Image (tube, helix red, strand yellow):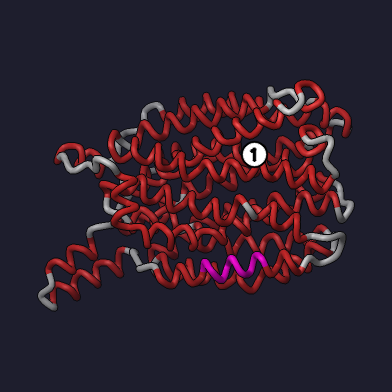
Amino acid sequence: MLRLASAALAGTAIEFYDFFVYGTAAALVLGPLFFPSFSPLAGTLAAFGTFGVGFLARPLGSAIFGHIGDRYGRRPVLLASLLLTGLATVAVGCVPTYDSIGVAAPALLVLLRFLQGLGLGGEWGGAVLLTAEHAPERRRGLWSSFPQIGPPVGFLLANGIVLALSATLTDAQFTSWGWRVPFWAAGVLALAGLWLRRSVEETPQFRALAESGRRADAPLAEVVRGHWRLLLLTGGALAVGYAVFYAVTTWSLAYATEHLGMGRTTVLACVMGAVTLMGVATPPLAALGDRYGRRPLCLAGSAACVVWMFPLVALLGTADPLLMTLGFVGALLGMVTMFAVVGAYLPELYAPRIRCTGAAVGYNLGGVLGGALTPIAATALADGTGPQWGVAVYLSAIALVSLVCFALLPETGPAVVRARAQAGAAAGTETGAAEAAAPV
């Protein structure tokens, strides 16, 4: 399990590195380089617009790779998605600026960002199923949290490289060529990830499906037709996690440097400190999910996000690095309280024959609802320095919607499912007992 979970974590970290390095570049340099005729605010909005394209592509990627995962196995998804995202990211670092090729420059950015999103849309489903379907039932949440550590690791890796470049290069050097280096580094990381995953074995549950001939012919159609309500609820439930994460890691970076006059090195250091604590907290919170259930942690995390968005914005407005870091830490701990357990929670909601598609599409639908629009909406709502209460209202509203969605989802933790099955058997309802246990 440790070898499998490590391979899942490494690959997910590399893919999220690819995705996050674009967000950092969008916050810092892509606006003036690719949209020079726009005002600074409009240029940032346009850059965040290209950032959002990746989120729009992720559900499509999850549908394509989910079909592959449910029909042909989880392992091919792990390799193909990593290769696609890595190639697209390296290509972003090679795109000439607007001054060199005109409108073709932002058009190429949009295309490559779309390909990034396609690849990442397939990655998450393959990685969490690799661990969830190999893990023992009582520790499924803990082992499935390893891919959830991938995003913090990828973020720290991406921004660590940007931070090092910012600290060693002049502004002119960074704007001219330094911002491209993290994109080129993605090629080396992708090769390393493919090497790590080369010997990963197919999961036992998919092998059983293949041997029995019970694989879904059209997984997406089956999910949409039979589980559309579950799909919408999971997308709405996960929206707050994306909204909070990208408000902290992308919008706040642009806002603090452009409106508060802070240095990008200082702000990146504050965000990276908070993300580090988020990654460290993930396994213990996932273990709590194994003990007490997935849903209670999701409800607690959503509720924490509802109440913390106003302190977050107030602390950000102080421009004090320590207070800003405190605000970031509180927001990300609320977010990870729910995201630590979703690696086990979402797969448990779907039967194995449609699990790769259902879990991945639901997860990435949340990305569209919460991640694609948040940097754009927050930038548009922010006006000058000081606390941005409009941003706080926006984020709290998303958190409230997610809280309601989690309240409408069932619990899937092993202890609860066994109790339901036993209660159904005691009442003489074998069908109900079987249905209660089937998705897990």
The spot of residue 189 in percent (x, y) is 57, 28
Closest to the observer: 153 or 407?
Answer: 407
Residues in magenta?
A: 394-402
Quadrant showing the C terminus = bottom left
Residue 228 magenta-drawn? Answer: no
Q: Is residue 274 visible?
A: no
Q: Classify 420 as above or below 335.
A: below
Residue 398 magenta-drawn? Answer: yes
The spot of residue 94 in percent (x, y) is 68, 22
Q: Amino acid at mark 1?
A: Leu
Lateral position of residue 418 relative to residue 336, left or right: left
Q: Residues within 10 Å of mark 1 (few under 14, many from 20)?
A: many
- Tell me which residue sits at (50%, 59%) in the image: 238
- Tell me which residue sits at (37%, 41%) in the image: 66
Q: Is residue 296 visible?
A: yes
- Tell me which residue sits at (50%, 57%) in the image: 339
The spot of residue 400 in percent (x, y) is 56, 71
The spot of residue 250 in percent (x, y) is 70, 49
The residue indicated by pointer 1 is 157
Q: Quadrant of residue 141?
A: bottom left
User: What type of secondary structure mainly makes up the magenta span?
Assistant: helix
Closest to the observer: 408 or 294?
Answer: 408
Closest to the observer: 5 or 185?
Answer: 185
Q: Secondary structure at mark 1?
A: helix
- Tell me which residue sits at (65%, 55%) in the image: 374
Lateral position of residue 290 relative to residue 99, left or right: left
Q: Classify 206 as above or below 229.
A: above
Q: Residue furthest bottom?
A: 427
Q: Quadrant of residue 162?
A: top right
